[in-house]
Amino acid sequence: MEAIMKVLFLLVNSTCDINCTNCFYTTGHEKRSRFRVQPEIVGRAAERIASVGFNTVILSGGDPLHSRFKYETYVLISELKARGLKVIINTSAVRLTEEDLDTIIGLGVDRVDISIDSHDADINNALRGRHHDTVSAITGLIERGYRNVVTTTVVAKLNTPTLMETISWLKGLGVEDVRIQRVFLPNDSTDDGGTIMQAMRDVEPSLRASHASRYIELTERAFNGQSASCGVVWGKNTLCAMHRERSLHVSIVRTSSSETCSKILLTQCCKRSRAMS
Ligand SMILES: C[S@@+](CC[C@H](N)C(=O)[O-])C[C@H]1O[C@@H](n2cnc3c(N)ncnc32)[C@H](O)[C@@H]1O
Ligand code: SF4
């Protein structure tokens, strides 16, 4: 059944425990700032998010589970869940204790999307860092019986040759939904000869997400400067954040001590999309 999907992509901060090589913060295409969700406003923010009709909130950043600010995120999550919203976390998961894993499950987080770029610690650490900690978080959640762990692997030149191995290894760890995302580097002029897109097409049959092939197709179109079938020309950046989730109704809210959720920027593409599975 078709349903309007109302997904809020909420950047709770721009702070991280690591500096990933290709990240737009590290490469300087985005500036880190001091904005972050403050515990005093999360009740109001959650109320506002629910009242304007969102049904799902994706918490991203920076890192929502940053070692210093994760407690604020937990407060926000409990306020969002109290209003019946579905909550997804995008995280590096590099600074999670056993207690954090219990807290995340206890709060009823609907999906934890953990970024990991390779099964090979050296490759992952060259791209992101802290392979061991990331793997511990993934396996820790799975060992607790939590089934909603998703991983995201950003496909770049370095991990392209071993992408299939990475996908198989993640599935072997018990990750049921392994996802990929093409690296985008604004103003990047390096030519990979099409190997990144080819590797993504090669692994597509091994991916579970029903929209994987559509995502790969849209990525290719965006990188070729072509419009999506809905007629909108997506920026490479926009595409990665939105179409991957099929979150075609997306807003971005930045909150800080001086701002509240009254500042909602609504970005619309297609009018309708299938509800997220
Ligand atoms: C910006 S991060 C924010 C959430 C969290 N810090 C994390 O690393 O998962 C969201 C996703 O974007 C990915 N990403 C970062 N830089 C990217 C780039 N240049 N191209 C494509 N994806 C990128 C990350 O690997 C991660 O999967
Ligand atoms: S942890 Fe996420 S936001 Fe931080 S540098 Fe890495 S990819 Fe970027």
Image (cartoon, rainbow, N blue to C red):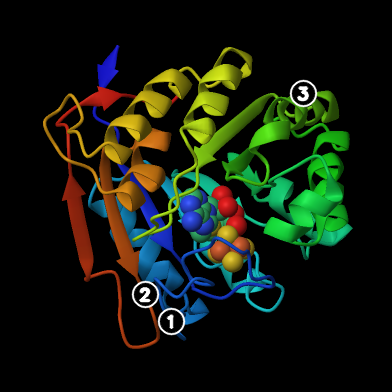
Q: Residue at x 47, y 23 (%)?
A: 212
Tell me where residue 276 appears, x and y as whole percent: 41, 27
The N terminus, quarter of image: top left
Is tag 1's residue or tag 3's residue first in the polypeptide sequence?
1
User: Is 156 on the left or on the right of 93, as rendered?
Assistant: left
- For label 1, the residue is 35
User: For numbered disc 2, what is the local secondary structure?
Assistant: loop
Tell me where residue 183 appears, x and y as whole percent: 49, 47
Give yes or no for contact between labels 1 and 3 (Cβ–Cβ under 8 Å): no
User: Looking at the image, which is closer to me, 1 or 150?
Assistant: 150
Q: CA distance from mark 2 to mark 3?
A: 38 Å
Up-down relation of residue 238 to residue 19 (above or below) = above
User: Looking at the image, which is closer to me, 63 or 193?
Assistant: 193
Tell me where residue 246 appears, x and y as whole percent: 35, 32
Q: CA distance from mark 1 to mark 3?
A: 38 Å
Circle 1 or circle 3, nearest the eye:
3
Categorize mark 3 by other alpha carbons within 10 Å: few (<14), some (14-19), many (20+). Answer: some
Query: Does the closest atom of ligand 1 sit within 8 Å of the Cβ of label 3?
Result: no
- For label 2, the residue is 255
Give yes or no for contact between labels 1 and 2 (Cβ–Cβ under 8 Å): yes
